[in-house]
Image (tube, rainbow, N blue to C red):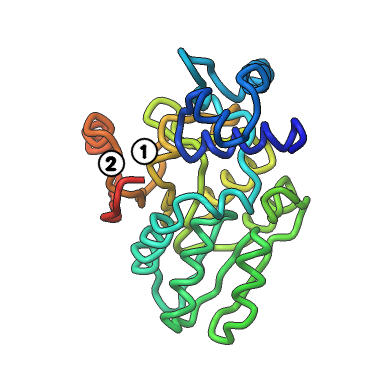
Amino acid sequence: MLPDERRTFIYSYLHQHAHAAINELVKLLDVSHMTIRRDLKEMEDEGKVTLISGGAKLNASLIQELPYVEKALLHHKVKRDIGIIAERFVESGKVIYLDAGTTTYEIARCVAKKLKKVAIVTNDFTIADFLMTMPHIDIYHTGGQIDIRNRSCVGHSAAQFIREHNIDVAFISSSSWDIEHGVSTPDEGKMLVKKAVLASSRRNVLVSDSSKYGKYGMFHICHLDQLDDIICDDQLPADVLKNLAAIDLRLHQAQTDKI
C-alpha cells in the first residue's frame, strides 16, 4: 500500500471509530510502528488528526470530507433508519430537495418505494441516476461545478438553480454540526448550495448521524435554530440532548444499535 493510500485508510478508519491506537493501526496495515507514527505526524501537520497518548483521534475541525464511496460504507443501517423517518415528511404533490450525500440517498430509496408523486430537486448524481427509473418522480438536477469526490454539483451555478425553485421540504446533509458552530462544512462550494436551500425551502431538515456531531468546518452554514427538524440516531450524549431541547426545533431519533 502506498503512503497516500495508507493515510487515506487511516483517515477513513478514524471517521468510523473516532480514535485509534498505534498498535491497532500497525496490525491493520501490517507496517511498523515508525511508519504509523510518521503517517500520523504528517496527518497532524495537515490538520486532519490530533495525536493522543498511544494513538490519534479525528480533529474536531474538519479539513476534508471523505469521498462518496468511502462514506457509503459507514453506518449504513443508521442511514437507512434515518431515511425511513425522513420519508414520513414527504407528501404527494410536494417539491422535495435531497442534498448530496449517502444519507439522503437512503431517503431517495425510501421515497421511491412509497410510490408518491413528487418532484425532487437534487445536486447529487447518484440520487438522480437512481430516481431516473421511477416514473412517478419528476427529477430536477441543479447542474453546476462538479465535485468529483462527492458525485455532486456545488458552487454559484447550483445555488442559483436552487434559488429559482420553491421547495416544500429540504433534507440537508452534513458531516459536521454541533451546538456551538451550528451546521458547517470544509467546502465553500457546498456552503453556497446549502445556504441557497435554507433560503428556498419552507421546512429545513438536517439529516446526520451522531458520529458527525462535535465536528466543524471552516464555512458556517446556519445555526441550529434556523432548522425546523433534525433526524439523527439515538446515540447523542445526554448533555447534547438537553441543549437541543432548549432550541426551537424538533429532534427525531432513529432507534438503532450503538454505532
- The tag on residue 225 is 1
Which residue is denoted by mark 2 in the rendering?
A: 248
Whether residue 163 is visible, yes or no, is yes
**Is 87 positioned to the left or the right of 13 in the image?**
left
State the quadrant of the C terminus.
top left
Name the quadrant of the N terminus. Answer: top right
Residue at the image position 32 percent from the left and 49 percent from the top: 233
Q: Quadrant of residue 91?
A: bottom left
Q: Amino acid at mark 1?
A: Asp
Q: CA distance from mark 2 to mark 1?
A: 6 Å
Q: Is residue 60 visible?
A: no
- What number is the disc on residue 145? none
Above or below for 205 versus 19: below
Q: Tag 2: Cα neighbours inside 10 Å, few (<14), some, or many (≥20)? A: few
Q: Observer-nearest residue: 140 or 212?
A: 212
Horizontal and vertical percent position of residue 195: 57, 44
Whether tag 2 and tag 1 are in contact, CB under 8 A, the answer is yes
